[in-house]
Image (spheres, helix red, strand yellow):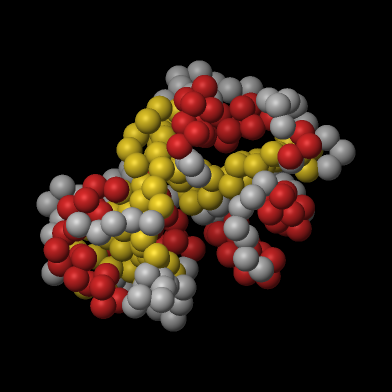
Amino acid sequence: MIRLCTDTRELGFLPPDPFCAVITALGDTYPADRDFIRFYLQGEDAALSIIDGNANLWCGKNADTREIADFIEFAGIRSLRSDISFFEKAEIKPDDSSYIVKYVSAGKPEEPDNFRSESDYKEIFNLLTAAGFEMGSYSAFLEDICARMNKGTCRGGFIYAGSLQCCAFRLFEGRKSALMGAVATDPGCRGRGFASSLVPYMAQGEKDSFLFCRNDSLLDFYEKCGFEYYGKWATKYFQGE
Protein backbone atom coordinates (compact mmCIF):
# COMPACT_ATOMS: atom_id res chain seq x y z
CA MET A 1 0.00 0.00 0.00
CA ILE A 2 1.27 3.47 -0.89
CA ARG A 3 1.57 5.86 2.04
CA LEU A 4 2.86 9.35 2.67
CA CYS A 5 6.39 9.45 4.10
CA THR A 6 6.52 11.98 6.91
CA ASP A 7 10.12 11.37 7.99
CA THR A 8 12.75 11.35 5.24
CA ARG A 9 15.01 9.15 7.36
CA GLU A 10 12.75 6.35 6.16
CA LEU A 11 14.34 6.70 2.72
CA GLY A 12 17.54 5.13 4.00
CA PHE A 13 16.74 1.69 2.58
CA LEU A 14 16.87 2.88 -1.02
CA PRO A 15 19.68 1.26 -3.05
CA PRO A 16 22.34 2.87 -5.24
CA ASP A 17 20.27 3.91 -8.25
CA PRO A 18 19.86 7.08 -10.33
CA PHE A 19 16.24 7.63 -9.29
CA CYS A 20 17.04 6.90 -5.65
CA ALA A 21 19.82 9.48 -5.88
CA VAL A 22 17.22 12.10 -6.79
CA ILE A 23 14.73 11.02 -4.14
CA THR A 24 17.23 10.83 -1.27
CA ALA A 25 18.96 14.07 -2.28
CA LEU A 26 15.61 15.85 -2.20
CA GLY A 27 14.88 14.19 1.14
CA ASP A 28 18.14 15.55 2.53
CA THR A 29 17.44 19.02 1.12
CA TYR A 30 13.83 19.64 2.07
CA PRO A 31 11.81 18.60 5.13
CA ALA A 32 8.89 16.31 4.36
CA ASP A 33 6.40 18.82 5.77
CA ARG A 34 6.94 21.45 3.04
CA ASP A 35 3.87 22.18 0.90
CA PHE A 36 5.69 21.91 -2.43
CA ILE A 37 7.25 18.48 -1.90
CA ARG A 38 5.94 15.06 -0.93
CA PHE A 39 7.49 11.62 -0.54
CA TYR A 40 5.56 8.36 -0.83
CA LEU A 41 6.55 4.77 -0.10
CA GLN A 42 5.12 1.42 -1.12
CA GLY A 43 6.65 -0.63 1.67
CA GLU A 44 10.30 -1.01 0.68
CA ASP A 45 9.35 -1.86 -2.91
CA ALA A 46 8.91 1.62 -4.38
CA ALA A 47 9.52 5.28 -3.58
CA LEU A 48 8.18 8.44 -5.16
CA SER A 49 9.13 12.09 -4.74
CA ILE A 50 6.90 14.87 -6.05
CA ILE A 51 8.28 18.42 -6.07
CA ASP A 52 6.26 21.22 -7.65
CA GLY A 53 4.21 18.55 -9.42
CA ASN A 54 7.21 16.79 -10.98
CA ALA A 55 7.68 13.18 -9.83
CA ASN A 56 10.60 10.77 -9.73
CA LEU A 57 9.85 7.10 -9.18
CA TRP A 58 11.99 4.14 -8.14
CA CYS A 59 10.53 0.64 -8.33
CA GLY A 60 12.04 -2.52 -6.93
CA LYS A 61 11.38 -5.93 -8.45
CA ASN A 62 8.39 -6.57 -6.15
CA ALA A 63 6.68 -3.21 -6.66
CA ASP A 64 2.94 -3.23 -7.34
CA THR A 65 2.97 -1.49 -10.70
CA ARG A 66 -0.80 -1.32 -11.02
CA GLU A 67 -1.25 0.40 -7.66
CA ILE A 68 1.48 2.92 -8.53
CA ALA A 69 -0.07 3.65 -11.94
CA ASP A 70 -3.49 4.19 -10.34
CA PHE A 71 -1.96 6.47 -7.70
CA ILE A 72 -0.16 8.55 -10.33
CA GLU A 73 -3.38 8.95 -12.32
CA PHE A 74 -5.10 10.64 -9.37
CA ALA A 75 -2.08 12.43 -7.87
CA GLY A 76 -2.40 15.44 -10.15
CA ILE A 77 1.25 15.48 -11.15
CA ARG A 78 2.69 17.40 -14.10
CA SER A 79 5.38 14.90 -15.08
CA LEU A 80 6.74 11.50 -14.11
CA ARG A 81 10.29 10.25 -14.65
CA SER A 82 11.28 6.65 -13.97
CA ASP A 83 13.04 3.67 -15.47
CA ILE A 84 11.48 2.74 -18.77
CA SER A 85 10.61 -0.70 -17.39
CA PHE A 86 7.92 0.89 -15.21
CA PHE A 87 6.22 2.45 -18.22
CA GLU A 88 6.36 -0.84 -20.08
CA LYS A 89 4.81 -2.78 -17.18
CA ALA A 90 2.19 -0.09 -16.55
CA GLU A 91 1.43 0.14 -20.29
CA ILE A 92 1.99 3.90 -20.25
CA LYS A 93 3.51 5.47 -23.35
CA PRO A 94 6.26 7.93 -22.35
CA ASP A 95 6.82 11.21 -24.16
CA ASP A 96 10.60 11.20 -23.91
CA SER A 97 13.30 8.62 -23.29
CA SER A 98 17.04 8.04 -23.66
CA TYR A 99 19.96 6.23 -22.07
CA ILE A 100 21.15 5.98 -18.48
CA VAL A 101 24.91 5.55 -18.11
CA LYS A 102 26.99 4.59 -15.08
CA TYR A 103 30.58 5.57 -14.41
CA VAL A 104 32.77 2.47 -14.28
CA SER A 105 36.31 3.64 -15.01
CA ALA A 106 38.83 2.35 -12.46
CA GLY A 107 41.32 5.11 -13.18
CA LYS A 108 41.66 8.33 -11.22
CA PRO A 109 41.15 11.27 -13.58
CA GLU A 110 43.41 14.26 -13.16
CA GLU A 111 42.01 17.65 -12.26
CA PRO A 112 41.31 19.52 -15.52
CA ASP A 113 43.31 22.62 -16.36
CA ASN A 114 41.69 25.83 -15.14
CA PHE A 115 39.30 23.89 -12.90
CA ARG A 116 37.21 25.65 -10.28
CA SER A 117 34.78 24.23 -7.76
CA GLU A 118 32.72 27.44 -7.64
CA SER A 119 31.23 29.77 -10.22
CA ASP A 120 28.89 32.71 -10.53
CA TYR A 121 25.32 31.43 -10.71
CA LYS A 122 24.36 33.86 -13.46
CA GLU A 123 27.26 32.61 -15.60
CA ILE A 124 26.11 29.02 -15.05
CA PHE A 125 22.55 29.92 -16.02
CA ASN A 126 23.70 31.71 -19.17
CA LEU A 127 25.97 28.83 -20.20
CA LEU A 128 23.26 26.23 -19.76
CA THR A 129 20.82 28.40 -21.69
CA ALA A 130 23.31 28.84 -24.54
CA ALA A 131 23.86 25.07 -24.59
CA GLY A 132 20.15 24.46 -25.20
CA PHE A 133 18.88 23.51 -21.75
CA GLU A 134 15.32 24.54 -20.92
CA MET A 135 16.02 26.68 -17.89
CA GLY A 136 12.83 28.55 -17.01
CA SER A 137 13.35 31.72 -14.98
CA TYR A 138 16.66 32.65 -13.39
CA SER A 139 15.00 33.18 -10.01
CA ALA A 140 13.58 29.64 -9.99
CA PHE A 141 16.96 28.22 -11.04
CA LEU A 142 18.74 30.19 -8.34
CA GLU A 143 16.32 29.12 -5.61
CA ASP A 144 16.62 25.44 -6.56
CA ILE A 145 20.38 25.21 -6.97
CA CYS A 146 21.15 27.31 -3.89
CA ALA A 147 18.97 25.10 -1.70
CA ARG A 148 20.79 21.95 -2.79
CA MET A 149 24.27 23.46 -2.85
CA ASN A 150 23.78 24.73 0.69
CA LYS A 151 22.73 21.26 1.88
CA GLY A 152 25.57 19.49 0.09
CA THR A 153 23.18 17.58 -2.18
CA CYS A 154 24.49 19.27 -5.33
CA ARG A 155 28.07 19.99 -6.39
CA GLY A 156 29.47 21.55 -9.53
CA GLY A 157 32.76 21.65 -11.41
CA PHE A 158 33.77 24.41 -13.80
CA ILE A 159 36.47 25.19 -16.35
CA TYR A 160 37.44 28.81 -16.85
CA ALA A 161 39.55 30.39 -19.55
CA GLY A 162 38.86 34.05 -18.95
CA SER A 163 35.15 33.22 -18.60
CA LEU A 164 33.12 30.10 -17.85
CA GLN A 165 33.77 27.61 -20.66
CA CYS A 166 32.35 24.33 -19.33
CA CYS A 167 30.37 22.99 -16.40
CA ALA A 168 29.29 19.60 -15.05
CA PHE A 169 27.29 18.86 -11.93
CA ARG A 170 26.60 16.12 -9.47
CA LEU A 171 23.05 17.44 -9.55
CA PHE A 172 21.62 15.09 -6.95
CA GLU A 173 24.12 13.87 -4.39
CA GLY A 174 22.07 11.05 -2.88
CA ARG A 175 22.86 8.88 0.10
CA LYS A 176 24.32 5.95 -1.83
CA SER A 177 24.62 7.26 -5.39
CA ALA A 178 24.73 10.48 -7.38
CA LEU A 179 22.97 11.63 -10.52
CA MET A 180 25.09 13.85 -12.72
CA GLY A 181 23.84 16.35 -15.27
CA ALA A 182 23.89 19.94 -16.55
CA VAL A 183 26.97 19.16 -18.64
CA ALA A 184 27.53 22.07 -20.97
CA THR A 185 30.30 23.70 -22.99
CA ASP A 186 30.19 27.19 -24.43
CA PRO A 187 29.23 26.74 -28.11
CA GLY A 188 32.30 28.68 -29.19
CA CYS A 189 34.65 26.42 -27.23
CA ARG A 190 33.50 22.96 -28.25
CA GLY A 191 35.98 20.43 -29.54
CA ARG A 192 38.70 21.38 -27.05
CA GLY A 193 38.17 18.44 -24.69
CA PHE A 194 36.74 20.48 -21.82
CA ALA A 195 33.75 18.23 -21.11
CA SER A 196 35.69 14.99 -21.69
CA SER A 197 38.14 15.97 -18.94
CA LEU A 198 35.64 17.55 -16.55
CA VAL A 199 32.94 14.86 -16.56
CA PRO A 200 35.16 11.92 -15.44
CA TYR A 201 36.76 14.11 -12.79
CA MET A 202 33.34 14.95 -11.35
CA ALA A 203 32.14 11.34 -11.65
CA GLN A 204 34.86 9.76 -9.53
CA GLY A 205 34.22 8.92 -5.88
CA GLU A 206 32.96 6.25 -3.52
CA LYS A 207 29.32 6.55 -4.61
CA ASP A 208 28.02 5.16 -7.88
CA SER A 209 27.64 8.00 -10.39
CA PHE A 210 24.89 7.92 -13.01
CA LEU A 211 23.92 10.27 -15.79
CA PHE A 212 20.84 10.63 -17.97
CA CYS A 213 21.80 11.26 -21.60
CA ARG A 214 19.76 14.12 -23.05
CA ASN A 215 19.52 12.21 -26.32
CA ASP A 216 20.72 8.90 -27.74
CA SER A 217 23.59 10.46 -29.71
CA LEU A 218 25.47 11.26 -26.48
CA LEU A 219 25.95 7.60 -25.52
CA ASP A 220 29.23 7.30 -27.45
CA PHE A 221 30.62 10.45 -25.82
CA TYR A 222 29.93 9.24 -22.29
CA GLU A 223 31.32 5.78 -23.01
CA LYS A 224 34.57 7.50 -24.01
CA CYS A 225 34.45 9.34 -20.65
CA GLY A 226 34.41 6.07 -18.67
CA PHE A 227 30.68 5.35 -18.46
CA GLU A 228 28.77 2.30 -19.62
CA TYR A 229 25.18 1.66 -20.63
CA TYR A 230 22.99 1.03 -17.57
CA GLY A 231 19.39 1.29 -18.81
CA LYS A 232 16.89 3.81 -20.09
CA TRP A 233 14.97 6.61 -18.41
CA ALA A 234 11.61 7.82 -19.60
CA THR A 235 9.33 10.77 -18.87
CA LYS A 236 5.58 11.22 -19.20
CA TYR A 237 3.95 14.67 -19.19
CA PHE A 238 0.43 14.94 -17.88
CA GLN A 239 -0.42 18.63 -18.14
CA GLY A 240 -3.44 19.34 -20.23
CA GLU A 241 -4.85 15.83 -19.95
Residue drawn at (22%, 51%) of the image: 88
Which residue is more in the foreground, 84 or 49?
Answer: 84
Position of residue 85 relative to residue 228, above or below, is below
Which residue is at a point 25% across and 54% down the rendered structure image? Answer: 87
Left or right? Give the position of 12 relative to 52.
left
Image coordinates of residue 152 in percent, x first then y, are 55, 53
Residue 156 in picture, x, y percent from top left:
62, 45
Name of the residue lying farthest toward the bottom: 35
Which of the 4 quarters of the picture holds residue 177? top left
Q: Position of residue 90 (x, y in %)?
A: 19, 58
Q: Which of 239 and 197 is in front in this view?
A: 239
Question: Which quarter of the figure is the C terminus placed in?
Answer: bottom left
Q: In which quarter of the image is residue 44?
A: bottom left
User: Residue 114, position in %: x, y?
Assistant: 77, 31
Residue at 15% over, 67% down: 67
Please tell me whether residue 208 is drawn above or below residue 151 in the rendered image. Answer: above
Q: Residue at x 31, y 63 (%)?
A: 48
Can residue 240 be seen by looking at this rendering? yes
User: Looking at the rendering, in which quadrant would you find the N terminus?
Assistant: bottom left
Relative side of 1 to 74, left or right: left
